[in-house]
Amino acid sequence: MNPAGIPLKEPSVSAAAGDTEQLERALIDASTRVPVLIFYTSAMAWLILGTLLAGFVSFKLHTPDLLSDISFLTWGRVRPAHMNVMVYGWASMAGIGTAIWLMARLCRTVLRYPLLLVAGAAFWNLGVLLGLGGILLGDSTGYQWLEFPSYAAIILFVAYTLVASWAVLMFRFRRGEQIYISQWYLLGAFLWFPWLYAAGQLMLFVVPVQGVLQAAVGWWYANNLLFLWFGAIGLGTAYYMIPKVIGRPVYSYHLASIGFWSYALFSSWTGMQRLVDGPFPAWMVTASIAATILTLIPVATVGLNHHMTMQGYFPLMRYSPTLRFTVFGAMSYTVFSLVGVVISLRSVAGYVNFTEASVAYSHLGLYAFFTMVIFGSMYYIVPRLIGREWRYGSLIKLHFWASAYGIGLMTLMLLAGGFLQGASMENPSLAFSESVESVLPYLRGRSLAGILLTVSHFIFAYHFGLMLFGLGRKSTVPTFLNPVEAEGAEAHI
Amino acid sequence: MKGLAPLFLGIFGTFAFSWVGLTLVPNWQIGHLNPQSDEEGTDIYPMPQSGMVRWGARVYAANGCVYCHSEQVRADYAGADIERKWGDRRSAPRDYIFERPVFLGKMRMGQDLANIGARAPAEQESPSPGGGGNPGGSPTGPAQSPSSPTAQPKAQGAQSPGASAAPQQQPATSPATSPAASPTSPASKPAAIARASTRIASPSPAVAAVAASPGAPPSAGPPWPEQTAGLPPMYSAAWHHVHLYSPRSINFDSNMPSYRFLYQARRISDVRSSDALQLTGSDAPPEGWEIIPTYDAKCLVAYMMALNQSHPLKEVKSAGSAPAVSPAASPSAAPGGQPPPK
């Protein structure tokens, strides 16, 4: 079926997939082509913009006088602009693109109502653009991850409704009885997000809750966005890509089921642990800390499941870009969760609560886990939409290493710097400025990591642009990271 | 998994559980707090915010101050906030009932601001006599708290202006002059808020400087050049304006960006505006020009001056109250290193 010997079959379908099935899949892919590419292309544009903004944020933090006299480039506006562009522009749009394609594939039906999705993408872009402009012009609301002013939020919500109604319609037309694991996660993400977003908007802006509860709702929203929206899409994608690329069914459905339900139950209760020792009833914070610790159950089951699926197939990461990115992301999910548990423990949180460590945590979740999984899925999906293979294996390799080293360095810098900062801050015999001084070298290191990430994103954008303009390789063989040796490797694969 | 119904129900059920548990139940528990008052219905805390303060909160949000400054004081067992003199008791939900948005904050690249208004010199509230009238402060002072001239005499500590000549970066050199009055026994209720504003021992020489000044006649010249090297008293409104305009002119180590776009340069037409910033060195405008705050800047400073959680709350053990006053009042008890102004 595939000359390189990497079988490409549905995880849940028998190996004896016939020609009809391949044809059917090609038809499905073709039907998703326009909407998915629109989402991907927009996401890439936002990724590049968000990366440039991130550079500003990072450099301005240790060089405060850099361009500070221009109101729309002041640090306090560029930072939320960067976060929101990444969250709603890049991550959400790329995630939706992948989710659409996965949904169509897994429902085994051609994509219906593509116009809904195209309109959704247009509104989404408009919403992010308006929101970005609003933040830079001084219209930010001041709630983390909900900074977009209400006129942008409404447009985003409309866009979202279009996409979600499409997803539910799609489900209605699915073929086959079995609902694959990825579909649980995707359906969950599509149903959780509107509720979450509406609840956040309503409780903060329409009928605002009183006082500190605004902060509680804000962090509940931010954490659930991270877990139930990005996390669910990321895990769903990993559950599809890993078995798919190595051509082996998921190790255990049972584990997957436990993982999914415990994930839905526990991760949705997190959020308040980031307000530890704040002016709240103690039970709220304690409940979230307990929930954070309990997320170890889904982490363990998902991690075990992926590991057992990959067992014996790890060498394939040498060749398949998709697998390499996805496995990196899946492993980062474990790291992300473990870091989350550690920094939420009261004894540790006392030190790192108000430091850069929480920035490290967000980057671990949103970049090392989610973005890497999405990169992997894009390497898999884009060739199938365009009918060309990625042009340069070397560029993919560069992209991977720059991203991996970049995010690794960034996380280490921010975590180490955060702990030092917290240690100085909690020592009242040191002047407060000492705590800032102690983190500055690490922030410079973070800027270095940011340069690596910038390089990797530009490489990827260039490569993606080549694909978009039809300049990919015409070949039936997927692009591998390393040449597949004629004999030995194939036997191993 | 087969069948959509269990999947849908589970997806909705788990999320509904979290939504009810983490947002609705707390809203039912602490979502409808009222200001507290004493038996006679006076001494109300907290008070609704003035219009300038509300607009100042918008400016605070728009410029992302919350990404570096928190506004919450943790209990003494949970962190060093109280030891750092960021407050004399932990913050409680009731402190925030009129705040919207609430800027609890998640990062401290800068100091905690929960009590920044309480750290201002008491003379903020009585414009003209106290140290020659704090120009930038005049718009904000009256808005905040019922001003009471009786707040002034409380600061009786270091009388010598010489002590305050020390650079402001080392405020520890002059431990505070803190209110002698015990906050636990508010005899005269209306003055309580004004008194509260001095109770948090501001370790600043500025307080000393100002404390010394009531005796001195109001001078016509620039208010504080002799005492604080050209700078207004620490945490006064005028100080905030200079700090926002040029943070590193006040604290060399500061990592705060300057917010010059909130200020405008203007040619002095006739007399120097009373709002004009007292800038020195390279920050000073050219001859014949002055730097004045925009309305946004005035509101932002008014907002900061209104941040004051020093009023005791019934539900919070005023951990600071009884013990904190005495150490603050006695110079020897002040810790070696105080947080410098940021």
Image (cartoon, coloured by chain):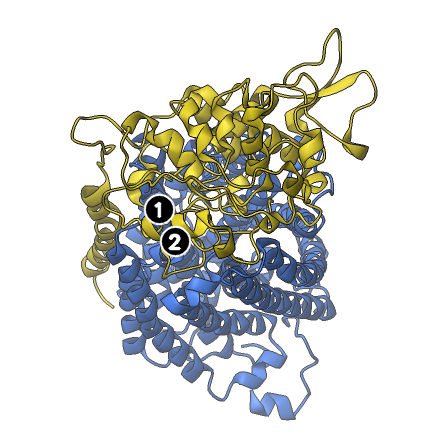
Chain colours: A blue, B yellow
Q: Are marks 1 and 2 in contact (CB under 8 Å)?
A: yes
Q: Are marks 1 and 2 on the same chain?
A: yes
Residue beneath disc 1: B91
Query: How busy is the neighbourhood of tag 1: few (under 14 within 10 Å), some, or many (20 plus)?
Result: many
**Residue at point 48% right, 67% down?**
A22
- The numbered dot on residue A330 is none
Farthest residue toward the left? B39
Give percent across and percent down for residue B100.
38, 33
**Residue at point 36% right, 50% down?**
B320
Answer yes or no: is residue A179 visible.
no
- Quadrant containing the C terminus of chain A in the rendered view: bottom right
The quadrant in which residue B313 appears is top left
**Secondary element at image label 1:** loop
Amino acid at dot 1: Ser
Give percent across and percent down for residue A12.
36, 73
The count of marks equals 2
Q: Tell me: residue A343, above or below residue B222.
A: below
**Secondary element at image label 2:** loop
Give percent across and percent down for residue B135.
60, 20
Q: In front: B282, or A65?
A: B282
**Residue at point 72% right, 39% down?**
B249
Residue beneath disc 2: B74
- Quadrant containing the N terminus of chain A in the rendered view: bottom right
Dot placed on the residue nearer the N-terminal end, 1 or 2 = 2
